[in-house]
Image (cartoon, helix red, strand yellow):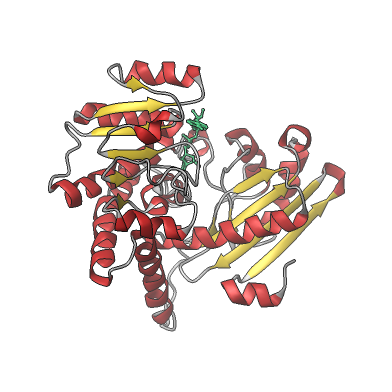
Amino acid sequence: MVSFERLYKDGHEEVIFFSDPSCKLKAIVAIHNTTLGPALGGTRIWNYASEEEAIDDVLRLSKGMTYKNAVSGLNLGGGKAVIIGDPKEIKSEALFRSYGRFLESLNGRYITAEDVNTSVEDIEHIFTETGNVVGIAEIHGGSGNPSPYTARGVFRGIEAACTKVFGNRSTKGKVVALQGAGSVGRHLGEMLYNDGAQVIVCDISEKNIELFLQKVPNAKVVGVNEIYDVECDIYAPCALGATVNDDTINRLKCKIVAGAANNQLKEPKHGDILREKGILYAPDYLINAGGVMNVSIEFEGWSNDKAIRMVDTIYDTTLEIFKISDEQNIGVHRATDLLAEKRIEAIKNISGKYLGNLAHRFPGRKTRRN
Ligand code: NAD
């Protein structure tokens, strides 16, 4: 249940339920923290077993967005939304437009984007009713597909890890075990190949492996269960979360874990075990932030140059986190949280200053209709 005790505990500011039986809309928006700016996070559609499960998910994910946006240097807070139901049954123009109208009523406190089971087409319907949405098509002034930017950020994170472990940022000659040849995996594979790395790849989809091999012709393909056992320098999870767990952690033969997947550590203790084993873990929610960085600049006018400049900061921030981890003798996952919290606190402390007549940083934009 949502209770004030629970919201106080994790620091959530606001939780809103939107209901419209005419189009089967059951949506929950959680705004976790807006110290740095309006809350940004995607809308996920999922057939949750219970409303309780949906509430748990939206509270957890919105808090995660506060940390991700903060450590990525964005002037954005953290929020997330879930729509309850089977996407195959409930998705419709009316549902997304009704949802968009509700979002408009939040006056820009929450900005949404794509997430699991929402597509660019769905976002277009939301955009018909509210300007507080990013990840829209390039033709409407949006930033298009985020995956190349996510892959670029992951590559920068891998370079930072190579700098720390091997004393050189290049991946040339390094063996990378890449799990997942999807949108991000394919772009990452190409960057690694161009840099001279040797890629070992696995995927449950033969079609995606085929597409991958067109970009990375010398990649070695292994079974989905074999990927944890291969001799490699870098394990790059780009498919699923929680793949560093009790079953896999002793099988990994790498020196670095760095990939695009969210929540790669099943539990925080797995980050500590990696550290004890001398395996460097690159902070997942920072190095996969290229996509959110890319969409975040839509409001100021998106350009490829701006996006690349922002994504490339991931290299330096990752090195800074490794430094905090060493200095404080804590796991990288804990050091990443610390850096995010430190930034939020520092910016909170300057918020009492009078700003004069400065325009609001995120004025929003008009909807497609007006
Ligand atoms: P995707 O769906 O395009 O690709 C995922 C790939 O993993 C697919 O090819 C799928 O067949 C494969 N896969 C699924 N189960 C597998 C298994 N057990 N073993 C091996 N392969 C398996 O997704 P994506 O957009 O490439 O994202 C990859 C990961 O990165 C996801 O965890 C996603 O949440 C995360 N992420 C993506 C972005 C982005 O911009 N796309 C941003 C941040 C985080």
In screen coordinates, is 195 left or right of 86? left
Relative image position of residue 78 (x, y in whole percent): 52, 61
Residue at 40 percent across and 81 percent down: it is: 349
In the image, residue 257 sits, relative to residue 202, either above or below, namely below
The answer to which of 338 and 228 lies nearer the viewer is 228
Q: Indicate the quadrant where residue 11 lies.
A: bottom right
- Image quarter in which the N terminus is found: bottom right
Q: Indicate the quadrant where residue 189 lies.
A: top left
Relative image position of residue 140 (x, y in whole percent): 53, 37
In the image, residue 315 sits, relative to residue 346, either above or below, namely above
| Viewer can see residue 29 | yes
In screen coordinates, is 269 left or right of 233? right
| Viewer can see residue 72 | no
In the image, residue 288 sits, relative to residue 340, either above or below, namely above
> How many numbered marks have been drawn onto this rendered protein structure?
0
Residue at 69 percent across and 76 percent down: it is: 4
In screen coordinates, is 111 left or right of 330? right
The answer to which of 313 and 198 lies nearer the viewer is 198
Residue at 73 percent across and 52 percent down: it is: 27
The answer to which of 364 and 210 lies nearer the viewer is 210
Relative image position of residue 123 (x, y in whole percent): 61, 40
Q: Return the residue found at the far left.
A: 167
Relative image position of residue 207 (x, y in whole percent): 49, 17
Residue at 64 percent across and 57 percent down: it is: 58
